[in-house]
Image (tube, rainbow, N blue to C red):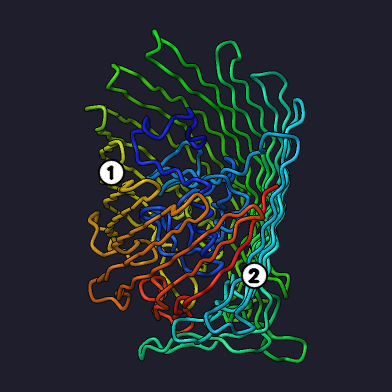
Amino acid sequence: MVTAKRNHATVNETPQKTTIITREEIEQQLAITSDSGQVLSNLIPSYSPGRQKLSNAGETFRGRSPLFLVDGVPQTNPLRDSARDSYTIDLSMVERIEVIHGASAEHGLGATGGIINFVTRKPEGGELNQSLNASVTTDDDVDSDGQGYKLGYQLSGQSGSWDYLAGATLQKRGIYYDGGDRIVGVAYPGEIQNSESYDVLAKIGYWLDDSQNVEFFVNRFELEGEGGYVPVPGDRANGEPTTARPGNPDGEPGYNRVTTARLSYTHDDWFGNRVDTQLYSQTFRAQFATTPYFPYQDEDGNTQFDQTRNESDKLGGKFTLTRAGLLNDHLTLTTGLDVLQDETKQVLVETGRTYVPDSQFRNLAGFVQGDIQVTDALSLHTGVRHEQAELDVNTYNTIDRSNVTQDNVTVQGGSPDFDETLFNAGIVYQVTDWAQIYGNYSEGFGMPDVGRVLRGIGTPGQDVDNLLQLQPIVTDNREVGTRFNWDRYHLEVSYYESDSEFGERLTEQNGTWVGSREKTEIKGVEVTAEADVFSRHTLGFVYTYASGKSDTDGDGSVDKKLTGINIAPETVKLTWSAGWTSALSSHLQFQQFLDRDVEGEQLDFDGYGLLDGAMAYQTSAGTVSLGIENLLDEDYFTYYSQAARVSDEYYFKGRGRTIKLGYQLDF
């Protein structure tokens, strides 16, 4: 069952590609790396290669932005995209990951590329279950500054009508070394290397009866850089990477501090209906490291540089009612109402100035979804969702980027509102017991990066009510595919097209990203296959390809290829999971990212291949694991560094061979 689907459909019932990542698959990846971006890239077809940074800017899904959820609570910040929404929970706290491919409006704002829902761990049966784990990580030369560790503990259980779960992790990360044994450069926005993080999760549930459950869940995640290193710019023209050296960076380290809370109520049989309700909140603080883009003069007349912090607070609710068994068990209707309030601003830390004004976004949406089982083999799916949204911004002053203590222009505030009606329609046909075809049309609703628009105004006399750049992004997704499920073999092939008449393409200007509102068209193909060739031996294959263009001259025809900030490279992935005995298992994975040409741009991509491996041995005293990331010690420039940005300061190599030794005891 896919809880990210409002009708709780199962994977083989959906008219669009859906991926379920199990706890076993997550643990295989965590034995190799704890980097969320890397894990998602390894496991989700059409997700961009991980950046290995705290920022996930450029990590797109089918060429567009995914909506990240934790138990259905949105983590994405639409008003000022911090590009850190995949770093709000430790994956040790996640039971499975539900992935809906392609634009979707099921959870409202943000899913123009798809939905990625982190489903948190569930309490186990019995009164008390405990799990203790520890791991150490090092580069292959065992340098002292390249070493790290992670500790984790969880307990859960059930007692009468109550169930509970609590967990905590603490992680220290060392410096990263590339395949040539150089320190990987540190990024201005923020780092996961040389950082410390913790995650604390608590969940308690109460069963009113066999059909009714109330649950409260809260998660606190913090990740903060430790400083001590300063960037050394590279030389892109001559192939010299950005590196780092010991030193004292200006300002305070970058960090993520996120608190997510949810109160939910479910009733499986309320007068024949299923009821799902939740109230939620999220507090998000993302501080960026000091950059040379925010100069000011101190009391002595010396030039200093400021740093920024995003502050976002969400409150919301989701109410869903599902009625099955209508029309002699041929029709299931799902209807609901969503509400959201998001308040966001971006401040300058040292000077106390406001970089992005305090903005309040209020969203109300109602929907109805119908699933019709026409025959045993044929099902139809259709729905409609109506969005009403309002953005409130008071009159404010933009800052002078040559001296951030000075104002630039005054912008009149306003309250622009938006109404969008979004549709979806799909079909699933079971051709034989082992063959299925499906087709889908769906629309996604997103906002441009409002903060980028508001802070970037430099022309006097502007009015928030009249800014066309604030119009919503509506994405049309069309998809056809087929699934084959034999006894030991599984194959799925899907082709998709994703178009937006008024999309957003990021371009770099003077060291900052600016959103250009342009028509965009993206298309691609995904192939996934799995074979149980022998008992306890499984082979996997994934192939993805995408291309996209935008209309840069406004003539209505797309004319320029989208770069690596949007489009992932053509990719081939191979996996082999083996259970050699009841105690010994192994996992190998290889990814080949193929070359990509962007019509004479400086953003062409020279591909590379990465091999990772892990082994685990289970004993009565616990499970010991050994994982090696970049097993062949490939020396490469990351996809983002090559294909997304022309910059000597962001020309990073990827992490070299890294060894991780872990231990887990369940008792």
Image position, residue 621 (x, y; %): 67, 55
Image position, residue 19 (x, y; %): 41, 44
Image position, residue 5 (x, y; %): 47, 34
**How many residues crowd around disc 1 within 10 Å: few (fewer than 14), some, or many (20 or more)?**
some
Disc 2 element: strand
Provide the residue designation for mark 1: 491
Question: Which numbered disc flags the more N-terminal residue, 2 or 1?
Answer: 2
Query: Residue at 41% across / 29% down in the picture?
Result: 384
Q: Quadrant of residue 454?
A: bottom right
Provide the residue designation for mark 2: 308
Q: What numbered label is drawn on residue 547?
A: none
Type of amino acid at the residue the image marks with label 1? Leu
Task: Confirm whether residue 468 shows in the render.
Answer: no
Q: Nearer the viewer, residue 474 or 529?
A: 529
Q: Nearer the viewer, residue 183 or 467?
A: 183
Q: Nearer the viewer, residue 449 or 51?
A: 51
Image position, residue 69 (x, y; %): 55, 46
Q: Are marks 2 and 1 in contact (CB under 8 Å)?
A: no
Disc 1 element: strand
Type of amino acid at the residue the image marks with label 2? Thr
Q: Of the residues tagged 2 and 1, which is closer to the observer? A: 1
Picture layout, residue 245 above or below residue 459 = below
